[in-house]
Amino acid sequence: MNKERRVRVLVAKPGLDGHDRGARIIARAYRDAGFEVVYSGLHQTPEEVVQAAIQEDVDMIGLSSLAGAHMYLFPRVVELLKEKNADDIVVCGGGIFPEEDIPKLKNAGIKEVFTPGTPLTEIVNWVKENVNPGGV
Amino acid sequence: MFNKKSLEDIADEEKKWQKLFNEYTLKAPERLKRFSTVSDRPIKNIYTPLDIDDLDYSKETAFPGIYPFTRGVQPTMYRGRLWTMRMFAGLGSAKDTNERFHLLVNEGQTGLSTAFDMPTLMGYDTDSPRSRGECGKCGVAIDSLKDMEILFAGLPIDKITTSMTINPPASILWAMYIAMAENRGIDRRIIGGTIQNDMLKEFIAQKTFMCPPKPSMRLITDTVEFGTKEVPRWNTISISGYHIREAGSTAVQELAFTLADGIAYVEAALERGLDVDAFAPRLSFFFNSHLDFFEEIAKFRAARRMWSRIMKERFKAKDERSLWLRFHTQTAGCSLTAQQPYNNVIRTSLEALAAVLGGTQSLHTNSLDEVLAIPTEEAATIALRTQQIIAEESGVANTIDPLGGSFFVERLTTDMEEEAFEYIKKIDDMGGMVAAIERNYPQMEIADAAYQYQLQVDSQEKTVVGVNKYVNEEEIPIEILQIDEELEEKQIKWLNEVKENRDNNKVKEVLEKLGEASQGNSNLMPVIIEAVKAYATEQEITDVFRDVFGVYRDPGVY
Amino acid sequence: MEIVQKIKTGDIRAVARLIRDIDDNIPEAREVLKELYSATGNAYVIGVTGAPGVGKSTLVDQMVSHLRKSGKTVGVLAVDPTSPFSGGAILGDRVRMQRHSMDEGVFIRSMATRGAFGGLTQSTRSAIDVLDAMGKDYVIVETVGVGQDEVDIVRSSDTTLIVLVPGMGDDVQALKAGILEVGDIFVINKSDREGVDKTVGDIRLMIEMGEKRYKDGWRPPILTTQAAFDKGIRELLDEIEKHRLHLLSNKTMLSKLRYEKAKSDLSEMIKDKIAKEIFIDITSSGEFEEAIKSIIDKKIDPYTACDKIVSAKLKSNIR
């Protein structure tokens, strides 16, 4: 039998903002990099995001936010993963954030933060280097 | 426009010139393999009279104020009156925004434009679990008529017009505005302004939605009908291409999908039994002005020509005002960069210039920090000054449609019109825009265009200064406006107070009445106004709609 | 095994991980499946298939709502195709069911078809077993398409729904080949669209022409639904229940059905194992590469090459 772990990612849009251009582009880029991408759809609560991540057994959650609510939403996702003993799932954030929020997000357990202008290949490579499919 | 003999001469000369051009490129090749617009439209090395030899000046271009209005809707354009400089504002609580409104009015601004926060835009109250962390973040938080009263306190709403960027709950916020005016003794026939109220582009692009497309169209048509009869100075729909473009569409897609949305609204109002000339003059449009200078100018010109043709030929409108495509423009938020943010001033200037050369009726210029947060006062002032410099220093407003007759711009105008009409035909064949949206057709077209563009940026086929070229290693952070983190708690407390101090039996009664009315066919505006006057909250009303009409969820198209 | 216990008590993380391991071909997963087998056979499996865009996910979403209202627990497997270019996939069905994600009585899992060698059917089959063993009353399997693959997955279902939309005249013709035999219920979704009567008529005609196939007494009903507006779903579930009772009432048929299912499961599993083990061995050997070169150079014909390679491999395996 040959093992074939494949990266599984949940691309999620927590909060009420509907700007999904970035989320949809990154989902396509992940697919084209050979990942399996589950998309949460818009307008999700952190609770819904975490439940989907667990059921789908993803290796990473990519959160996207463009309307300023990231300081509540992103840390809340990390917190809920801990509560569910699922904090082996890597959490990343993409979107528009004031410079001073980035260290705060990282302190809250967001492993990496991608801001506009980051080339897709850079994001994909980061995932390849930092995410172990199946946690092994 | 040219006689046959001179066209033949030009053709001969062009052949010679192209040969010369090719000889030069043998020595030094062209700097790009392919020249194209932001929307990936290929562009030739030169445009000549041969490119517009099929253009009939009187029929296609004509004079400003004359059908098909390619050069402008009014005969005088900016020689008479400059465009309205209408800056979008809204932050924090109703009181915070009221203060900023007073400041703007004192500076001489004659129109207000309101930005709401995400919960208000989506039809949730601040105390909903779905609103956590969002209160006041990207606009003002409004939960009930009380907030609306505070928002416009002391402002001369009988003299100034107000634009409200609101969609799924547009009928409710409009009802609040009408109620607020009436409570101050101002007749609803006197107040003027605009509600965006364009749900089709929400399904296509901006994704602020509540109920499915069909009941959404019913709510919109209710407002159109009510406005026509009762609030005659109000623009009840602002048909918007802005968000379609922000979602990553091409210029032609923006043009085509916006006008196709317009067609759907006109058809819905006609089905309601309204006379086309009774409501069409109150339809207004809202476009994006992106970076590709000439393509944008051509887009605006094509839009005017297309709409007047659609209204005249398809809908047989007779009133000249029904044929006018009047539009507001906002410079492209998606063209701004967080890197080297001062460059955004230059980008916005070029985009604003394109909007003016395209004949816009009003304009919002983005602030340099708009990509990061709600603008600071300083940044918003620079953005306003940009418009004032274009208007009063550059001289571009001295003559009407200065680019009319440009071989390049006229060719682009005609090409874009043709391509956009092809899209509209495709949508018609699907059964109109509502049916096309249900098939995710425009959504998919935009998603494809957005992905293609991103790949071109990543491969540096398209340049974004400061992002994929001319990058600075060290970025100097700019000052950013922060929203009070305690605002959410305060607003919830205030909301609870409002709920305690109203007649809750009356609220219950009127909400039940609204539920019943929603199941029938009557116009809902009167009962919505009754509900907001009883201080029913925004979400109490939207919950009735969600119950009766169902909830629309993201179909998740890639 | 501790994990077996966890699955049986419905531990979400354990279930999610096991399905992942099955999909990723982790040998230990097979061991767990062996242990779980005795706990399977209790869930009622509904297959939902049809062309892209007919509204399968929305239909499944509404079926889940109704089943939950009547107190049943539900597992959903939503299968989407893997991109042949990158091996990746966008699994978008969940979006339309995401409102159930907070409901403890619902487990939704998206799967990609991954590769061509029965991966879809084998992993999906095993995943059905896992959801069954975790105690779900119903397992709904959604697959895209109108071809042979779906017929395979359909063999694992107790009731199979074929979903169509009005105005699919040509597609109905195309469907005839494989799907007719396996459709227990035909669902015409988006029935507010034009052409619904014609589509219903076309299918009715197909069923009548295939009358002799329905010797067991079940004649596939045709239902119209508007899943987006929750119309016709109650009636659909009533038909599914009728079909279930029909299966239970007929002892001969039930045992025939069980035989067919076990046979198909086992043969698929054998095919899969052969494909995965022998095929991959062969294609990664130097001999395989040499044969390709010889074929190009016309030194050998592909038929002879194939016979030679396969018989050599089989002999060596037997030894």
Image: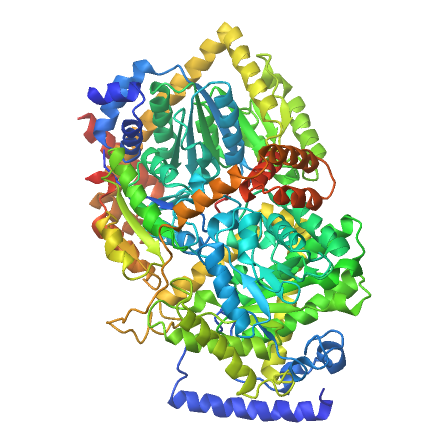
Choose between B22 and B120: the one closer to the eye. Answer: B120
Residue C293 in percent (x, y) is at 28, 51
**Horizontal arrangement in the rendering, residue C307 relative to residue B230 (left or right):** left
**Horizontal arrangement in the rendering, residue B317 relative to residue B61 (left or right):** right
Residue B386 in percent (x, y) is at 48, 79
Choose top left, top right, bottom left or bottom right for residue B303. bottom right
**Horizontal arrangement in the rendering, residue A67 relative to residue B310 (left or right):** left
> Which residue shows up at 55% across the image and 63% down it?
B113
> Which residue shows up at 29% across the image and 46% down it?
A75
Residue C316 in percent (x, y) is at 19, 31
Say if B489 sits above or below B198 in the image: above
> Which residue shows up at 48% across the image and 79% down it?
B385
Choose top left, top right, bottom left or bottom right for residue B442. bottom right
Colouring chosen for the image of the structure: rainbow
Say if B69 sits above or below B501 in the image: below
Choose top left, top right, bottom left or bottom right for residue B254. bottom right
Residue B8 in percent (x, y) is at 67, 90
